[in-house]
């Protein structure tokens, strides 16, 4: 097993996760099998109980693991399926060491950070690296390890020591260290400054790790004299220094690495030249350039609770982008704070109220993502009502589906007090209830989590057609509340169809309105299985309906399901939509109108 370790210096948020994912992409393009591990030095056991404001979204894996959002990047870029053990935290390691001590595994020894904690870290990495993640029974050739945080953080010290020991344990030629650092440009002098990177590398070397490759984040490519200064003071060969400068979208990062021959440097360090081939990134290049060339917009209003922090909805954004690029539309996301749609805002902040409703009414489609808590719920209900009454394409995910059910009960069934017991425990019309198997005393790991099977109960519904007319589909879940099964008959009599249910037929998974252009709610989180070139079916349906292409997409899915067109093995049930290059590559410069991901927005923080 070969290892590539990615560390970060100077400041957080430099893009270590995207860098690690891109390294995996280019190694996979060289014909190697790749897996990935993320190390988070915080004491939490997992990310499940953390606020999105603390750490962005919680990404959910097939096995129910609630993990750091960087594992979502790994899965999307590498098209693999990871496990909860691919996310290492201080909490997990500490718990494992304490459990071993209680069992008497240390034979009376004094349990210490070195060697017991550091050994546990190394053993965990080596064990998980051998687990197949690409659908085959064979282990990976290379494991990419990302160390979260910044070099010098106190909480990272045991991991730094363990990784230094791992380098010695696996031997020379088996571990390549890539250090991601910042080379800022000060506006006052207008030149690239290397001193932060020099200090970062000095700190890394002082901790016993020596970088093999420097990946320098900057606004533009490194100048030759700047690179030579880094060679002199950081003791890294010039050919092993690459620049990760600002690009129109992150799909260009693997191409940047390839163009600067980063793969050759990695393969040299790992002695893999004899087994690797030249990287084949034709499809990746076409998709990145297509994303740059798109000009016909599709506007999606994202009505949520955490609209000031896009990382809270990172996978939803990526799924929208995958679908819009596949349909050759430029995605424009209008962030609509749910609370700004509520009647109380008219008095408190009339300008915000008008702005929110203007965005909602100007959208081609409306999406209400998952969430917890009652803040903004009334605004989300109003958004669902507006979409239903004005025939605007609507997609509700998890809570967004429950919101649609509550709105339907209030507006169509005249149950004015209809609600979820999450928001009103005494409601007389509980449309959404707490799941019987849930825990009300423990928060972590007690939800309905991971991949679950949904069976289609209406064969000709839109969602079934989008999934290729399959009888069932496996999608990932993360929820404590569900639609009240005792009220389903009343909803269906009024026209709200529950087209997807679990294996018991008692848990509602998909809702649709047949007399609406596209009004779909799903209890699961389809965004977690969306991939570049393999968009999630229900997201494709939303974008297609928003730009008037839904019938064509449904017909294509029908032809694929009946064998008239070749499928490309898409795991979530929709045929892979071919990417065609519609324009020439643009210069890789920062585009101030996007967030660096090819997604345009209305100016909210991305």
Image (cartoon, rainbow, N blue to C red):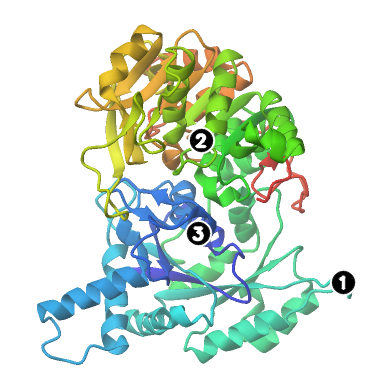
Who's the residue at 49% across and 88% down the image? 207
Task: Check disc 3 and report its element: helix, strand or loop.
Answer: helix
Q: Position of residue 471 (x, y in %)?
A: 28, 20
Mark 1 = which residue? 190
Which residue is more in the foreground, 110 or 63?
110
Who's the residue at 42% across and 23% down the image? 405
Determine which of the numbered discs, if any, sits on residue 486 in the image. Answer: none
- Residue 333 drawn above or below residue 21: above
- Distance of mark 2 from mark 3, alpha carbons? 23 Å
Q: Is residue 80 left or right of residue 248?
A: left
Do we see residue 216 in this rendering? yes
- Residue 438 drawn above or below residue 36: above
Q: Earlier in the sequence, mark 2 or mark 3?
A: 3
Quarter where residue 107 is shown: bottom left
Who's the residue at 78% across and 49% down the image? 592
Mark 2 = which residue? 377
- Residue 263 drawn above or below residue 105: above
Instruction: From the image, state whether disc 3 or disc 1 is nearer to you.
Output: 3
Determine which of the numbered discs, if any, sits on residue 55 in the image. Answer: 3
- Distance of mark 1 from mark 2, alpha carbons? 48 Å
Which residue is more in the foreground, 194 or 451?
451
């Amino acid at each position: 097993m070969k290892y590539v370790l990615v560390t970060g210096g100077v400041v957080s948020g430099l893009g270590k996760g995207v860098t690690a994912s891109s390294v995996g992409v280019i190694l996979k393009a060289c014909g190697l099998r790749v897996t990935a591990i993320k190390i988070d030095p915080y004491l939490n056991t997992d990310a499940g109980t953390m606020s999105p404001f603390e750490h962005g979204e919680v990404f959910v894996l097939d096995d129910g693991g609630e993990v750091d959002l960087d594992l979502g990047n790994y899965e999307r870029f590498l098209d693999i399926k990871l496990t909860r053990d691919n996310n290492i935290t201080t909490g997990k390691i500490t718990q494992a060491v304490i459990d071993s001590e209680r069992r008497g595994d240390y034979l009376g020894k004094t349990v210490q950070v070195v060697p017991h904690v550091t050994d546990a870290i190394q053993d965990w990495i080596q064990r998980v690296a051998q687990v197949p993640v690409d659908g085959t029974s064979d282990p990976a050739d290379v494991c990419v390890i990302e160390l979260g945080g910044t070099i010098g953080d106190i909480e990272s010290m045991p991991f730094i020591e363990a990784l230094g020991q791992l380098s010695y344990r696996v031997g020379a030629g088996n571990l390549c260290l890539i250090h991601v650092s910042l080379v800022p440009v000060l506006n006052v002098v207008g030149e690239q400054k290397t001193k932060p990177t020099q200090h970062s590398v000095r700190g890394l070397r002082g901790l016993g790790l020596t970088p093999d490759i420097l990946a320098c984040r900057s606004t533009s490519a490194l100048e030759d004299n700047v690179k030579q200064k880094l060679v002199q003071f950081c003791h890294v060969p010039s050919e092993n220094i690459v620049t990760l400068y600002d690009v129109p979208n992150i799909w260009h990062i693997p191409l940047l690495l390839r163009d600067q021959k980063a793969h050759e440097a990695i393969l040299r360090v790992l002695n893999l030249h004899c087994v690797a081939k030249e990287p084949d990134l034709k499809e990746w290049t076409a998709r990145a350039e297509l994303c740059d060339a798109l000009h016909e917009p599709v506007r999606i209003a994202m009505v949520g609770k955490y609209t000031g922090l896009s990382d809270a909805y990172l996978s939803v954004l990526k799924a929208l982008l995958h679908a819009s690029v596949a349909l050759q539309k430029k995605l424009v996301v209008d962030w609509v704070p749910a609370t700004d749609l509520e009647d109380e805002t008219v008095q408190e902040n009339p300008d915000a109220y008008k702005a929110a409703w203007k965005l909602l009414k100007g959208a081609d489609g409306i999406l209400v993502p998952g969430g917890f808590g009652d803040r903004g719920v009334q605004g989300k209900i109003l958004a669902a009502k507006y979409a239903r009454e004005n025939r605007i394409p609507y997609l509700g995910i998890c809570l967004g589906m429950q919101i649609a059910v509550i709105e339907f009960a209030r507006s169509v069934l005249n149950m004015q007090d209809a609600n979820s017991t999450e928001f009103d425990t005494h409601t007389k019309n509980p449309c959404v209830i707490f799941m019987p198997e849930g825990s009300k005393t423990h928060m972590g790991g007690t939800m309905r989590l991971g991949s679950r099977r949904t069976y289609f109960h209406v064969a000709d519904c839109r969602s079934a057609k989008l999934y290729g007319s399959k009888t069932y589909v496996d999608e990932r879940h993360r929820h404590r509340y569900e639609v009240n099964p005792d009220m389903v008959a009343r909803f269906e009599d009024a026209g709200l169809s529950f087209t997807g249910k679990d294996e018991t037929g008692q848990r509602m998974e998909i809702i649709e309105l047949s007399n609406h252009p596209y009004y779909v709610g799903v209890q699961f989180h389809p965004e977690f299985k969306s991939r570049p070139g393999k968009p999630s079916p229900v997201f494709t349906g939303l974008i297609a309906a928003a730009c008037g292409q839904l019938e064509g997409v449904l017909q294509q899915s029908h032809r694929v399901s009946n064998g008239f067109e070749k499928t490309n093995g898409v795991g979530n049930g929709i045929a892979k939509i071919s990417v065609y290059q519609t324009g020439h590559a643009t210069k890789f410069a920062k585009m101030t109108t996007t967030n660096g991901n090819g997604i345009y927005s209305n100016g909210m923080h991305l």
